[in-house]
Image (cartoon, rainbow, N blue to C red):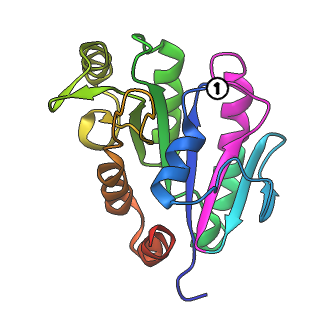
Amino acid sequence: EQLGRINLAVFGKTGVGKSTLVNAIFGERVAPTGIGAPVTMGSHLYLDQRGTLGVIDTRGLEIGRDDAELIKELTAAVKSSRSKPIDEQIHVALYCVRGMDRRFEDVEERFIRTLADLEIPVIVVLTQVPMRDGRFHPDAVELANQIKDRDLPIFGGRPFMTYALRDQFSGQPPYGLIDVLRATFHLAPEAVQAALVASQE
């Protein structure tokens, strides 16, 4: 009870590696869940409570296809949670984009700006970005620059490059997770920082 809980909302298009990223950061299968105590925050918005970690996920709705519905549910959930204890609120949002997708769409910008308007701090994470000799893949660098040029209300003003799991075929090692965790810690309200530390440990 003293630790409380940190609630991370994880967004991004289907197949960008949201679950893999969260699982890698916290060292266990926390998403997709199906265990724990899911709380419906809307028709398709779920908060899965895992002790000191809560993961907010969307099911059945896709960014790029159901934006209006997602934004409506998210807005309602955030506004209703404002009157609840701090460990029932959304603390930080991770918005994931596949690093090799080469394009960042206007609809994704609108979604991120909506989160910021709801006063939810946003970290943009580029997933599955190959790196060699300390250099990121040029396509991912180009995509990161596209995102940076949009001047979005995101932590650091730029995306974080990551590779969540070692690739058995290419030998690509994981990297970038600690940076995302540090950013999350920086943005999390002081009241739930102990919960974040407990979850990550």
Q: Secondary structure at mark 1?
A: loop
Residue 120: x %, y % from top left: 48, 49
What is the quadrant of the C terminus in the image?
A: bottom left
* Above or below 59: residue 8: below
- In the figure, 79 relative to 195: above or below? above
Relative height, residue 116 to residue 67 (above, below): below
What residue lies at 73% left-to-right and 53% top-to-bottom?
33
As drawn, is 136 to the left or to the right of 178? left
Please give the range of residues in magenta.
52-75
- According to the image, label 1 marks what residue? 14
Locate residue 186, reporting x and y percent: 31, 60
Q: Nearer the viewer, residue 196 or 131?
A: 131
Identity of the residue furthest to the right in this view: 43
Closest to the observer: 197 or 84? 197
Query: Which of the two residues, 146 or 28, is positioned nearer the viewer here?
Result: 28
* Location of the N terminus (image quadrant): bottom right
